Amino acid sequence: MRTFVLNFNRTVVLESYEGYSESIRCPYESQYQNNLKYMCRGNQRSTCRRQALITSHSRQHGRFRLDDDKISGKFTVTINSLTKSDSGSYLCGVQRNSDLDVFSAVELEVKGERSYCAEMPVTENELSILFLIGFYFSEAVHYAAYAVVPVVLLICVLIIIYKYKCYNVRGML
């Protein structure tokens, strides 16, 4: 499970996969540490609190969990067992008593099941190293083919010499 920290200035795009869990950390200013925190689906700020999926008053609801770290000034919403239907826009909100609530936004894209190869991205340097290893290995195989014939012939000659000497030693006895 990964954790993504949102900020107030821009929408964070989060890609994940079916069956995974993701944690989204939503920041708030210290003066709001005792205020209601919540997350809703969509991007309608005016109705977000009324349509909240989870709040700091109901910390667990279905696949959603909200944990508030008042010391760091961030609350974390974890969504478990993601499905493709979880894809879309979400808002983290903090209720302010005398003013408009404060929001940060995330766009979640849930893809199909993740393959093993997708879990291990390959960098350009790793690709270069793999190419060089493959090149040298193919060259080694190429040269080995030329080396096999003489080695086999040498082994045959040594066996013949050994048998000849064994035969001659027995004949002398």
Image (tube, rainbow, N blue to C red):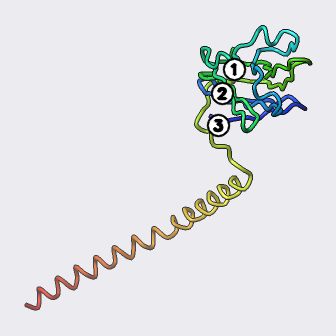
Q: Tell me the quadrant of the picture where the N terminus can be found.
A: top right
In this rendering, is residue 133 above or below 39? below
| Residue 47 sits above or below residue 90 on the image | above
Residue at position x 60%, y 14% in the image: 62
Amino acid carrying mark 2 in the image: Asp
Q: Mark 3 points at which residue?
A: 118
Q: Inspect the image, locate mark 1, and give the three-letter code of the amino acid beneath it.
A: Ser
Q: Image check: 163 left or right of 154?
A: left
Give the mark nearest the N terminus, 2 or 3. 2
Q: What is the spatial separation of the Cα atoms under label 2 and label 3, in whole angstroms? A: 30 Å
| Disc 1 target residue | 56
Where is residue 121 shown, x and y percent of the image? 67, 43
**x and y, in percent, of residue 28 in the image:** 81, 31
Q: What element carries label 1?
A: loop
Extreme-bottom residue of the structure = 172
Nearer to us of marks 2 and 3 is 2
Q: Residue 32 carries which label?
A: none
> Residue at the spot x=78%, y=20% of the render?
90
Number of marks in the image? 3
Q: Label 2: which residue?
A: 67
Callout 3 crowding tier (Cα within 10 Å): few <14, some 14–19, many ≥20: few
- At 15% from the left and 88% from the top, the residue drawn is 169
